[in-house]
Image (cartoon, grey):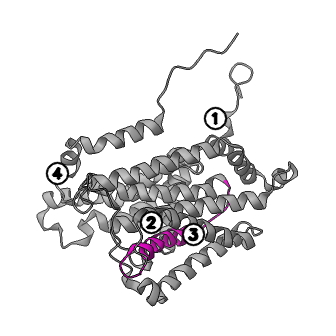
Amino acid sequence: MAPAKKPFALGWEPAIFLLLIAYPFLPVFESLFFGATNRSLGDQLPTIFVFAILALGLNVVVGNTGLLHLGIAAFFAIGAYTAGILTTAAYAFELPFYVALVVGPLLAALLGLLLGAPTLRLRGDYLALVTLGFGEVTKSALTNLQSITAGTQGLNPVPPPATPDFLPLDWASDYRPFYFLTLAALILVVILLRNIEASRLGRAWIAIREDELAANCMGLNPAKLKLAAFALGSGLAGLAGVLYATRLTSTSDPNAYDFNRSIIMICCLILGGLGNRLGVLLGVFLLVGFDNILCPIVDAKIQQLVPDSGGKIWMQFTGWRLSVFGLALILMMRFRPEGIIPSSRVKHELHPEETAPAIDGGRA
């Protein structure tokens, strides 16, 4: 007998993206969540979309391939400064945003290949130290090469994307153009990664992560597969960097691309679920959204209840956010180390009793 067809299901990812597409047309949510603050949720979401792309790029290397990467912020910076150099008036190029949107990821992917080629023979902590060192070298270079990067001042102003005359868009005061640009980029990245993960390349990455020696004996080339993961992860980080600089209209201070940035992205993966796209998106929304969305709302509510709380740091929720971060990670590692939405493989590794097939009347 042929198996019964499953009823049509939209799935979580398409449903979430449809809701995000509809959000700018539902202003009731702005007044509902941000009525007591001077912020706009729609204005904060593009930043979350950018960091979601960055985290998805890191997930290719860490979650899918199993390589500990502590320098993803360096490739994020490469994309941002590529956009600054190609588009700002400080240089003679002054190319359109869309050129930087292509060149930034390609340059970051190329540098990812150059970093990975001599170092991917290393494993575990040794590879992590190399990527950590590359990140610190990149940050120091951006700080000290003042004639190129403007040092701690950063390159600015990074112009917004050019639009046709018949389509006037106000990139400065209206959040919606950049909102839809970053959301479209995120959707395309998710579709790309979904197809890759279902392909032979994606399955090969999983094989490398599970057992590199066994994968090698089965005819896979671990070096080429790792290089492909490094290149794709670095390219996505460069794409996020281009969007980030354009969003800020500046490349920002080099300290914005330090080790802490890489660690926050790894925390997003751990919290949401390594190797699971939806889990990574959830982790970014929880951690980055905590800073950009939740903290201002709670601080505004505290200010309403206690008017003189503004000058007391212990009365501000923002002052406790790092403690909340740390406590949340401790609890996650203790009670749910696989993350909130783990991949099926990771869940099976950590909780085999929950995923084992039922035998003898339901006993596994």
Question: Which residue is at the front of the view, 262 or 236?
Answer: 236
Q: CA distance from mark 1 to mark 3?
A: 44 Å
Q: Specify start and end residues of the magenta stretch as a single range.
A: 65-92
| Element marked by disc 1 | helix
Q: Which badge, 4 or 2, is on the more N-terminal residue? A: 4
Q: Which residue is depicted at the point 55% across and 67% down?
A: 72
Residue pointed to by mark 2: 242
Q: Which residue is depicted at the point 67% across and 61% down?
A: 67
Is 284 positioned to the left or the right of 203 in the image? left
Give the class, few, some or many, for how many residues have Cα within 10 Å of label 2's Cα (few <14, many ≥20).
many
- Amino acid carrying label 1: it is Glu
Residue 317 found in image quarter: bottom left
Q: Which residue is depicted at the point 83% across and 55% down?
A: 213
Q: Which badge, 4 or 3, is on the more N-terminal residue? A: 4
Q: Which badge, 4 or 1, is on the more N-terminal residue? A: 4
Residue pointed to by mark 4: 35
Q: CA distance from mark 4 to mark 2?
A: 31 Å
What is the number of the mark on residue 354?
A: 1
| Element marked by disc 3 | helix
Marks 2 & 3, CB-CB < 8 Å contact: no
Residue lying furthest left: 307
Q: CA distance from mark 4 to mark 3?
A: 42 Å
Residue 266 seen from this side: no
